[in-house]
């Protein structure tokens, strides 16, 4: 028994020695844009890559401070460190200089930084795999590596600038989609992410994550990201309306909720019944009983499962039964 066991162990050990050394995890070669909209008080990042769950590595953003994309041979400490430097008053270029000064791996790093005031800088180390490079200007920094060519970042810049005046999330997505259409990551497609931070932009106004959507693994991640961004914009408006409602800011809550309803109807969002339900609540709080009744009737017709909630909801007292 012992002799046979020993022979098996030797065979297995020999087989393991014959295997090639296991490669480390792939570097997040990618194309990205960091951007700021100072008037709207928003900063954001959009990223795409032939890399699993790129959103877990590359993007960082903090409302009122800035946004960062750290990629290629990514040093993920660059994200929080750059944001802290910006918060202390450093410019985007100064933050990059400080981050890379004592980093032995800086020649293989690629980073984009934008401050909340629009100052931006992009860095591509000479050790990044071709094609690698970036472009930056007031309010944005674009960068990519292992791309099909420079035309990717050129197309991203053109799309971002051409979309001036639109919400930051839409501008970020337009840039990402343009980069993808121009060739994108030369290895193919897998994941994408879009993040927008705004003070009080998260659920209930408790954090700054106004929009935070990710596609971790998909054959068409940019297309899927576009679907999620459209829903996230509905959700962002909805969060604004509901946060204002809870805070008792009448008028403001109605403005945002009516915008939510219009956007949800325009894209045929699956959450339309729930949007209608909250529209009824907010219309009623603003004195529009007839409008509240109409919204609630539509909500219940679309999703009868909401009827029990409506009957017990103190925010809809007096509207549970049909009637003007």
Image: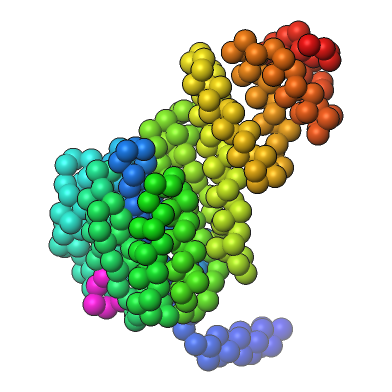
Image location (x, y in percent) of residue 227? 61, 53
- Magenta span has 125? yes
Residue 132 percent across, percent down from the top left: 32, 76
Specify start and end residues of the magenta stretch as a single range: 124-128
Quadrant containing the N terminus in the rendered view:
bottom right
Residue 287: quarter of image? top right
- For the point 24% across and 72% down, the residue is 125
Residue 50 horizontal/vertical position (percent): 50, 71
Picture coordinates of residue 49, whole percent (x, y): 48, 68
Residue at image x 19%, y 62%?
A: 100
Rendered position, 42 above or below 60: above
Q: Which residue occupies the foreground of this view, 155 or 224?
A: 155
Q: Quadrant of the image for the C terminus?
A: top right
Q: In the drawing, does residue 155 fall left or right of residue 114?
A: right
Which is more toward the observer, 231 or 197? 231
Figure coloring: rainbow
Evaluate whether residue 84 shows in this view.
no
Magenta-colored stretch includes residue 68: no
Left or right: 18 as drawn, with respect to 322: left
Dominant secondary structure, magenta? loop
Q: What residue is drawn where x is 24% and y is 66%?
A: 123
Residue 318 visible (yes or no): yes
């Amino acid at each position: 028994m012992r002799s046979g066991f020993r022979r098996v162990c030797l065979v297995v050990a020999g087989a393991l020695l014959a295997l090639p050394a296991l490669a480390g995890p792939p570097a997040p070669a990618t194309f990205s844009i960091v951007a700021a909209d100072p008037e709207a008080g928003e900063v954001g990042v959009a990223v795409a890559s032939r890399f699993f769950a790129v959103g877990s590595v590359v993007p960082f953003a903090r409302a009122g401070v800035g946004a960062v994309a750290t990629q290629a041979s990514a040093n993920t400490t660059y994200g929080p460190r750059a944001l802290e430097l910006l918060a202390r008053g450093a410019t985007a270029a100064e933050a990059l200089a400080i981050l890379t000064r004592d980093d032995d791996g800086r020649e293989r790093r690629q980073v984009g930084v934008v401050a909340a005031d629009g100052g931006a800088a992009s860095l591509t180390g000479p050790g990044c795999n071709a094609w690698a490079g970036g472009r930056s200007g007031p309010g944005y920094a674009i960068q990519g590596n292992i791309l099909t060519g420079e035309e990717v970042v050129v197309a991203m810049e053109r799309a971002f600038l051409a979309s001036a005046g639109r919400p930051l999330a839409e501008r970020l997505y337009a840039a990402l989609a343009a980069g993808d259409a121009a060739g994108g990551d030369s290895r193919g497609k897998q994941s994408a992410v879009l993040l927008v931070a705004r003070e009080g932009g998260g659920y209930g106004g408790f954090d700054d994550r106004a929009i935070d959507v990710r596609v971790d693994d998909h054959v068409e991640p940019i297309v899927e990201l576009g679907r999620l961004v459209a829903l996230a914009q509905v959700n962002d408006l909805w969060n604004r309306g509901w946060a204002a409602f809870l805070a008792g800011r009448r008028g403001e809550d109605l403005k945002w909720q009516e915008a939510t309803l219009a956007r949800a109807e325009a894209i045929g969002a699956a959450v339309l019944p729930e949007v209608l339900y909250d529209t009824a609540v907010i219309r009623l709080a603003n004195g529009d009983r007839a409008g509240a009744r109409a919204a609630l009737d539509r909500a219940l017709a679309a999703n009868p499962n909401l009827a029990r909630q409506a009957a017990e909801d103190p925010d809809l007292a007096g509207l549970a039964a049909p009637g003007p």
